Image (spheres, helix red, strand yellow):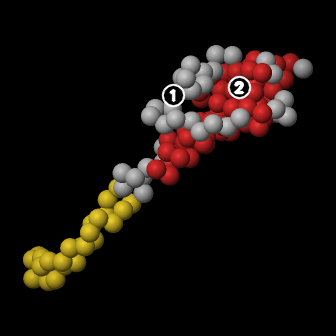
Amino acid sequence: MKTFTVTALLATAGIFGLSGCASTGNITPQYIPPSTYQSYDCQALNQEYVRVNSYVNAARNEQSTLASTGVGVGISAGRWGISPNISFGVGQSNNTKARDAKLSRLYGERDAIVQSARIQRCSFANGIKIYGE
């Protein structure tokens, strides 16, 4: 019984450490109905919240993809003499639509989990903000 209390306390502290202020930046969460999680008990909701939050953190840290920006043909001179040169312009793409769509869905899932936890009066959901609060 004592290990369950300590475990629950550590899990709750970890959640608050992970969530901090549930900011979504400029990305609006996709609507996910809280009823999706109505069959979950408080422990399962807590685990799901931690899991989704880890996906959010991973998606936020994703690098943008490489994009080809052009092909160049020229002549270069170097130590070995003059030689033809072909170069491919590769850089980071500013197209983050896929990442933003993933984050929108994850933010929606996270909000639905918190709303469902509030309905069930789960203690871990106290103090966690959702979009618009």
Q: Amino acid at mark 2?
A: Gln
Q: Locate the C terminus by quadrant.
A: top right
- Please tell me which residue is depicted at 63% across the width and 21% down the height of the picture: 128
Question: What residue is rendered at 43% in x and 49% in y?
Answer: 96
Question: Vertical placement of 87 versus 64: above or below?
Answer: below
Q: Quadrant of the N terminus?
A: top right
Give x and y (percent) for residue 9: 74, 20
Quarter of the rendering containing residue 15: top right
Q: Could one spot residue 3 in this view of the protein? A: no
32 or 90: nearer the viewer: 32
Q: Nearer the viewer, residue 41 or 29?
A: 29
Residue displayed at 78% across by 21% down: 119
Q: Residues within 10 Å of mark 2 (few under 14, many from 20)?
A: many
Which numbered mark, 2 or 1, is in the foreground of this view?
A: 2
Q: Position of residue 50 (x, y in %)?
A: 68, 34
- Say the numbered circle drawn on residue 115: 2
The residue that mark 1 highlights is: 23
Other residues around mark 1 within 10 Å, as few (<14) / some (14–19) / many (≥20): few
From the viewer's perspective, is 99 left or right of 90?
Answer: right
